[in-house]
Amino acid sequence: MLLKLVNWLDERFGWRSVWEAIFLRKIPHVNWLYTLGSATLFVAILQGITGILLTMYYVPTPDHAYDSVVYITTQLPAGWFIRGLHHWGASAMVVLTVAHLLRVFFYGAYKFPREATWITGVFLLVIVIGFGFTGYLLPWDQKAYWATTVGTRIVGVAPVIGDFILRVARGGDELSAVTLARFFGTHIWVLPAALATLVLVHLYLVIRIGISAVPAKEE
Amino acid sequence: MTQSQENKLNRRDFMKTAIVSIGGLIGAAIGLPAVSYVVGPALKKNTDEWIRLGSVSKVELNTPTLFKTTIETQTGWINAEEEFSAYVLTTNGQDFNVMSNICTHLGCRVRWIPDQDGFFCPCHNGIFAKDGSVVSGPPPRPLDRFEVKVEDGVLFVKRG
């Protein structure tokens, strides 16, 4: 009965061939370093889930941001856990992405025909760093405030257009409610949309081209 | 096929079982806290507390009198002052019937209209009598009553 239903659905959706293409594809004999990409994807999904949960209570205004974070951490059941996962997951994202990049680099896996996979990967690294930079401000505590003051100042030292970019990043001369709101919007809408799109392209390329074998010593 | 081979878990089945059970564990480790995190504030009940309404001498005989007071509330991370209102009715100056001004239909605020001798709800034309019982309209039950106490001529109600 259940099998009949599954078959009926598969006739219409064609899930089985998709499943086979993704999970039953041929791969060369590789080592544990090849799991770094999957580990990054896993943590990214975890960041998405915990991030969505945090927005249920977090409020991105100077009046309420800090208090709502304290409320999440101290008053809600498992709030410390959800926030803790998101906090440590953020560091894990950067570490894993860079480790994955180094693995691909030192194994020469970015070469033909995988250049496009590499390029999307580099953009993904930039997005991950963008997540870290915008997310750091959101608790609106002293550390967040001054880190963003310094971080946006660094942007400002670029010649000619530096001052303009600084003002765009802050939404004005100083860090303010505008800064917090635009960092939040970037963190939960712009970057996730960009990340999801690029991850799909990245994975499509990985599956279409297949992964490279560990290079032999003579190569 | 020998006996030992039949009972042996092959590599593919072992991996399947491992992935499903570890995946399930991770899912539960995130899912269960997530549910309590989302549901948490909904389980928090208002604590029972006595609210000071005002002096009993302000209550008019035989006509519902509106008492207004502000109470401190804490919702989430916000401390605020909330307005609390209730109608007080006494027929003998000794026993007090304190009624909520919240319509039992869908929660709009009812008003006592002296000329027409009834509480009127502006939302769906619910009408309650002086004692809070339903006269007409959609309300399913009479106006809610509060537990009352009088101390030194001051009226208190219990919000629960």
Image (cartoon, coloured by chain):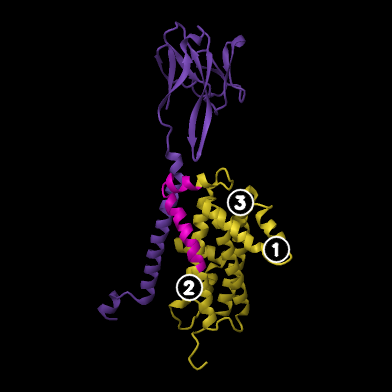
Chain colours: A yellow, B purple
Residue B136 rendering spot, x and y as whole percentages = 56, 18
Residues at circles 2 and 3 in contact by the CB criterion of under 8 Å: no
Residue picked out by circle 2: A36
Q: In which quarter of the image is the N terminus of chain A?
A: bottom left
Element carrying mark 1:
helix
Q: Earlier in the sequence, mark 2 or mark 1?
A: 2
Residue picked out by circle 3: A180
Q: What range is drawn magenta here?
A: A69-94
**Marks 2 and 1, how far apart in space?**
36 Å
Tags 2 and 1 on a common chain: yes
Q: Mark 3 lies on which chain?
A: A
Looking at this view, name the residue that lies furthest to the bottom.
A218
Q: Which residue is drawn at 46% across and 11% down?
A: B56
Q: Residue B46 carries which label?
A: none
Element carrying mark 3:
helix
Q: Which residue is drawn at 48% across and 65% down?
A: A92
Q: How crowded is mark 2: few (under 14 residues within 10 Å), some or many (20 or more)?
A: some
Q: Magenta region's main secondary structure?
A: helix
Residue A82 counted in the magenta span? yes
Task: Give the residue type at disc 1.
Answer: Gly
Residue B158 rendering spot, x and y as whole percentages = 42, 23
Q: How many marks overall?
A: 3
Task: Give the residue type at disc 2.
Answer: Leu
Residues at circles 2 and 1 in contact by the CB criterion of under 8 Å: no
Element carrying mark 2:
helix
Residue picked out by circle 1: A162
Residue A45 counted in the magenta span? no
Q: Residues within 10 Å of mark 3 (few under 14, many from 20)?
A: many
